[in-house]
Image (cartoon, rainbow, N blue to C red):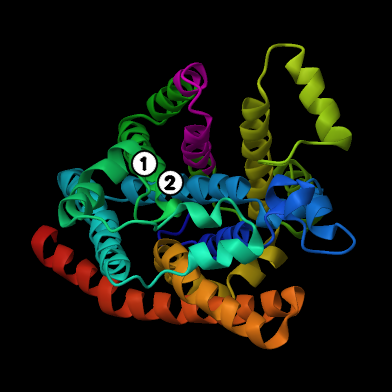
Amino acid sequence: MDKKRILWIDGLRGIACLCIFFHHWLSAFFYAAIVGEIQYVHTSNLMDMKFSRSPLSFWANGNFMVCIFCMVTGLVLTLQIMQVDHKHTAKVLIKRYFRLALPLFAVSAVVYLMLKYSLFHNAEAAGLSASDWLGKYYTTPISWKVLLKESFVTTWLFGRDTFSTAFWMMNLMFFGSYLVYAFGIAAKINKWAGVILAVLASLVMVYMNQLLMLNFCIGFLIALVMAKSKKKISNILVIPGIVLIIAGAWFGGFPAYAVPDGKYMWLTLTLGNYGISLQTVEHGMHIIGATLFMIGLALSKPLQNILESKVCIFMGRISYGVYLIHIPVLFSFGCWFFLLIFGYTGNYQLTSVIAFVVTMAVIILLAWAFNSLVEKNIGKILKKIFG
């Protein structure tokens, strides 16, 4: 495989981040679309509640998108470490931490100041949307000691999410990244050593009920297959690829918070007879879905071409910024703007559409600025230090 970046993977990562934002938007203003309970409904035909149990919800299913994001990370980091000279391995491992932690610290510092000057409006918006989730965060000021501790230690080791409810995943990304690096280093010595290590780690993760970590292991294995393959994708594989993507989307649509119904309920009850919990079924469904989705995309060149478009590549480039800032922006500007527009229109659905489009545009603009001014400069500094 060519050592250049796999562009469609970058595009997929960008789209996954936008889907995670949309999941959080629904959690804030259409909570019934997430938990499937009637007291949170904001549509006359219960469409939001029905959406929570529909296979079509896969693209707004935050946990499914997290699985894809982790799998993509495992794939990309495997290809990266496989191309690094042995003498530079230690530098790559150290650099990874600072590339993640320093941008997060920058965002957390801004959140610290926003809390200090009461710039969040999620509590007021939660009074209108009735979202229990929206009203829980950013309620009290935080000390600078907590800012430093969480930015550089506890967010990574324990998944603390004081500065953003999305930061729980940083713990997963931190350990998953270094797990994949370990697989990749072993595979450079002997391919089968890396595979065996990944399989053993997967068994340990299942035993410890850390199922989301399996996505990194699967991403590693997919990367090995892709690295070995030197042939162009045959057009004959497009249809099987699309079938796998559709199947992956169905698995990915399994409700993360709502009580399942239909065939999802049948699966839950059937597996429940064997002592498998609902959360385990949910994680398993999303992991299977993400795996099928990724393999399907790897076989479908036309869909890869879409993900390699300039828009998708741009979104991939700013994806870390989008992930870091989307919650603070949603809970501050997004909620403020929603309340402002609702005051003029008095129409909840119309307000939601207008506020969503404007808030998403603001997030993309700020993420672009964050990438240009913060991430790139951090990258330059780290390059000077570590080479």
Name the kind of residue labelled 2 in the image. Met
- Name the mark on residue 159: 1
Q: Quadrant of residue 53?
A: top right
| Depicted 164 relative to depicted 222: above or below | below
The single residue placed furthest to the top in the displayed view is: 274
| Depicted 6 relative to depicted 290: above or below | below
Pinpoint residue 72: horizontal percent, then vertical percent. 50, 50
Dot 2 alpha-carbon crowd within 10 angstroms: few under 14, some 14 to 19, many 20 or more: some
Name the kind of residue labelled 1 in the image. Gly
Marks 1,2: beta carbons within 8 A = yes
* Label located before the other in sequence (1 or 2): 1
Taking depth in this image into account, of 236 and 355 the one nearest to the observer is 355
Q: Secondary structure at mark 2?
A: helix
Q: Main secondary structure of the magenta part?
A: helix
Part of the protein shown in magenta: 203-222
63 sits to left or right of 265: left
